[in-house]
Image (tube, helix red, strand yellow):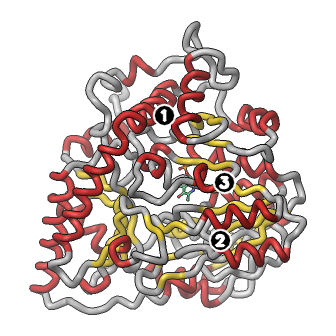
Amino acid sequence: MVEFNAPVLNEIKRYISSGPLPFHMPGHKMGKGFKKGHFDQIAAMDLTEIPLLDNLHFPEGIIKEALELAATAFGADKTFFLVNGSTSGIHAIIRTICNPGDKLIVSRDCHKSVIGGMMLAGVEPYYITPDFDREFGVPGTISPEKVCEAFEKNHDCAGILLTRPNYYGICSDLKSIAEIAASYGKVLAVDEAHGAHLKFSSKLPRCAMDLGADICVQSAHKTLPAFTQGAYLHVKSQKIDMEKLKYILGMLQTTSPSYVIMSSLDYSRAIMETEGEALFENLLYNIKWFINSLKFFNEFTVLSEVKTGSIQTDKTRLVINVSRTGLTGFEVERLLRFDYNIQVEMSDMGNIVCITTVSDTRDDFERLYLALQDIRNRVVREGKISDINIDTCFRIYDISEQVIPLKEAFNSRSKIVELNSAAGMIAKGTITPYPPGIPAVCPGERISRDVIEALLSLREQGGNVNGIGKHNEIEVIDF
Ligand SMILES: Cc1ncc(COP(=O)(O)O)c(C=O)c1O
């Protein structure tokens, strides 16, 4: 007799019963963010297009009403529900605003779905790099000057696709960028995957729809109480061909959209509209308490607290620099996970990154604070205080030379080589430190010695890099 064995289910159940504290997505934080009575019967809610439940692809009833309510709440002309995350929305945007062979201006700190979307659509990128923040070792803003220069050099482009906020909550000056895009008559698309919540607090940076973007995606599941994969696509523009967009979404999205996900997108909008401002007031109050408490220690600095003035940041994104503890962000993440049962969203060489949402309570912040205090005391006792060198972070995101077009790289033959011996070769796939999911090398690009060393060093320190095998092997183009 075969025994009942469901490893994923078993581990998830074990994990839940261990009482973890999530400072990561999804934003409902293991159900805490749902008020009682709404999602207590998730299995029963997993329905399909039966009478009265409408149809996502041809909405005429309750889904149509929910989409209209969402468009009003988010300040859009039209909103679509996405049940395969912002990824599907980004693919749809690229295919809607570009034709095969078109050029798109793209910020290099884009998510890998942007690269994948362009490859599949036969679109070629013109990259612009964000400034880098040396203090925290993270990508910063895209300046309006760089956007202007990019349009000047690419009058024939279809538009621009910008990531804002970035994974670290840093927000470029979108209002100025929108004015520039409009002056060139080009489409401004925004990957606002990390900013679905911005609309609902006057204390946070303003959202893409309010700042002049033509079209944007938002991963509701990251920062709002919505289920994983739940996202919105908003349009506010005459420049977008709505019929083409609908047609493409119909091809990219499943014909069996999850009612559980769609209900949570509806719930997030409703709860934000009715209680959003107060919920964020409370969250920001708790964050303030947490940051003030951390100030007792020299070893921790919080990005949003330091970067005031010229750079706008999302204060709900807690980027805590830990490099003065003598530990890397990777090491602090592991300590939090295995010694304190606290899971952060991600870490890099110098920082841990926590996604905080309205679902987090004061107790949660106190538990995180006590854990960091304890880690700090342990490190001091062990006399380990020293500065970690975070310089390698920068080299990873130097733009590599594009030798052959994305599409050609996609269709080329490949071979496997050792990363260390790949200097000068052309990448077949994307090499992406994950998280944050920002590509270091894209298909068709020459792999430089600097990038190789930075990637190897990142791996040695405990970072995860997609596109590099277990034994440091990578796929390159075989000419
Ligand atoms: C900047 C950015 N854009 C897009 C995505 C994709 O979003 P989703 O997971 O909702 O498909 C991510 C995911 O991490 C992201 O960080």
Rendered residue at 20%/77% (across/down): 295
Describe residue 332's horizontal placement relative to residue 210 as left or right.
left
At label 2, which amino acid type do we have? Arg
Rendered residue at 56%/73% (across/down): 141
At label 3, which amino acid type do we have? Ala
20, 415: nearer the viewer? 20
Rendered residue at 49%/87% (across/down): 392
Residue to which mark 3 is pinned = 213
Can the viewer see residue 412?
Answer: no
Q: Which quadrant of the figure has residue 243? A: top right
Residue to which mark 2 is pinned = 108
Q: CA distance from mark 3 to mark 2?
A: 19 Å
Q: Position of residue 171 (x, y in %)?
A: 52, 66
Label located before the other in sequence (1 or 3): 3
Label located before the other in sequence (2 or 1): 2
Q: CA distance from mark 1 to mark 3?
A: 21 Å
Q: CA distance from mark 2 to mark 1?
A: 29 Å
* SS category of the residue bearing label 2: loop
In the displayed structure, would residue 82 be above or below residue 173?
A: above
Using the image, tell me which numbered label, if any, was put on residue 265.
1
Q: Position of residue 190 (x, y in %)?
A: 64, 56
